[in-house]
Amino acid sequence: MSEALYSIVVDINGTRHVSHVTARTSLVDWLREHLHLTGTHIGCEHGICGACSVMLDGEPVRSCLMYAVQADGHRIVTVEGLQRPDGSLSVLQDSFCETHGLQCGYCTPGMLIAAQALLDANPRPTEAEIRDAIGGNLCRCTGYQQIVDAIALAARRIAEGET
Amino acid sequence: MKSPPFEYARAASIEAACELLSQHGDAAKIIAGGQSLVPMMAFRLLRPSWLIDINEIAALKFVAFESDAVRMGACTRQCVVMRDDALAARVPLLRQALAFVGHTQTRNRGTVGGSLVHADPSAELPLVAQVLEARLVLRTKSGTRTLPASALFAGPMMTNVRPDECLEEIHWPVWRERRTGSAFTEISRRHGDFAIAAAAAQIAVDDEGHCTRVSFGVGGTAPTPIAFPELGRHLVGHRVDKAKARAVAQEAAATLEPDSDIHASAAYRQHLAGVLMTRVLQQAYDAARAVR
């Protein structure tokens, strides 16, 4: 028996995508396998690691815990959507480079989405607020300190007027 | 780690969701936030033939204040509840408990109703529902019925919700007593994980500091969260100091028969239950007394 296909229209990083998906296709699989937006990583596939975090209508969610068909009519921002319009790194992304906020890079897209969501809602976070915001994202390399430093640095740079 | 095949229906209304439930019965599952359901499907612990999605039903997302209760739509997101100051002033245990629930990403998607009907014995919101005696409005194609939380939970991940019913609303009682305090605490392996043991309490006191109403309970130590209304009544008319709180908490903990698992032995869980209930009783009492 072939599986039914569902027609979906989703705004991803400002571009409208029309697609046909099986109901069981997770949002992250659709982003990576169908749209080739491989910036979003698949880690655990059951909602523990946070590597697949994306913004759904402006709020970070885990894209392994949603089916693509559920995103129909919604707005998604992936890590590819964080860069500046000219394709260069955003202040947040550059801050991760500055502080060595990544080593293997596997968790980084999820960390960036979680951090961007924090800075959008709270431009001057305390260290405790930063740690809470990335509490749902696992990193096995850095020990987290450089990631916390990166987010704090980005907040300072943005407060000083960098865009 | 991929979900098995299923068919998907996005319900436009609660009536449409109930109609689909009546057609498909046991073969269908409601999906709300999906933060527990989707992993269970990925692990293939569940294989529903149909998923009925209630996420787009605006009528299931609301918080309404009435004189003695807060009414909440079943699909209200946990993040919305956490941010709502007016709600926190009326039912403070919800925000206190949600601080221990998952992470930003899961609370942005996870719903209050979903957590209740998922009925994980160590989940925080079912414990709050049990302690506050929340009431749940369940809808079928032909009408509604209301269950108290104590009649909802039937066992670990088991409820008395029938296959053709969809949770529509939750009614959280609001205590009218001016001097009311509450507290929630838990021990888990990592912040945001399910609790090894959790405890919640809400206490009202008179101007002399005597308890006039006491509710408390424990989660993670039995097949369902448990409240101790009878033991709570024993505190009415008394002041609560540490010795008093400990005596009542130990009496409650002694009734438990927790299981051992990879995270904690039965003896440790029972010990934690006593310690955590002591803490929340004392904290809730102190908070009530601090109200001016």
Image: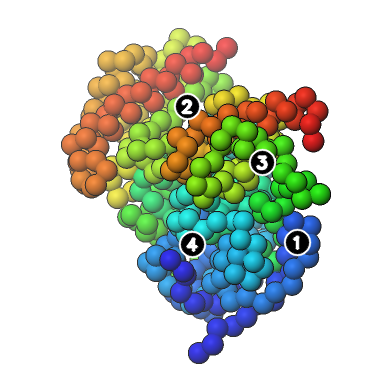
Q: Secondary structure at mark 2?
A: strand
Query: Up-down: is B142 above or below B263?
Result: below
Same chain, marks 1 and 2?
Answer: no
For mark 2, does the 10 Å Cα neighbourhood hold few (<14), some (14 to 19), or many (20 or more) residues? many
Q: Secondary structure at mark 4?
A: helix
Tell me the kind of residue under disc 4: Val
Q: Nearer the viewer, mark 4 or mark 1?
A: 1
- Point out the tag, 2 or 4, that comes first from the N-terminus: 4
For mark 1, does the 10 Å Cα neighbourhood hold few (<14), some (14 to 19), or many (20 or more) residues? some
Same chain, marks 1 and 3?
Answer: yes
- Point out the tag, 1 or 3, that comes first from the N-terminus: 1
Q: According to the image, label 3 marks what residue?
A: A93
Q: According to the image, label 1 marks what residue?
A: A11
Q: According to the image, label 2 marks what residue?
A: B182
Q: According to the image, label 4 marks what residue?
A: B38
Which residue is outermost to the top?
B208
Tell me the kind of residue under disc 1: Asp
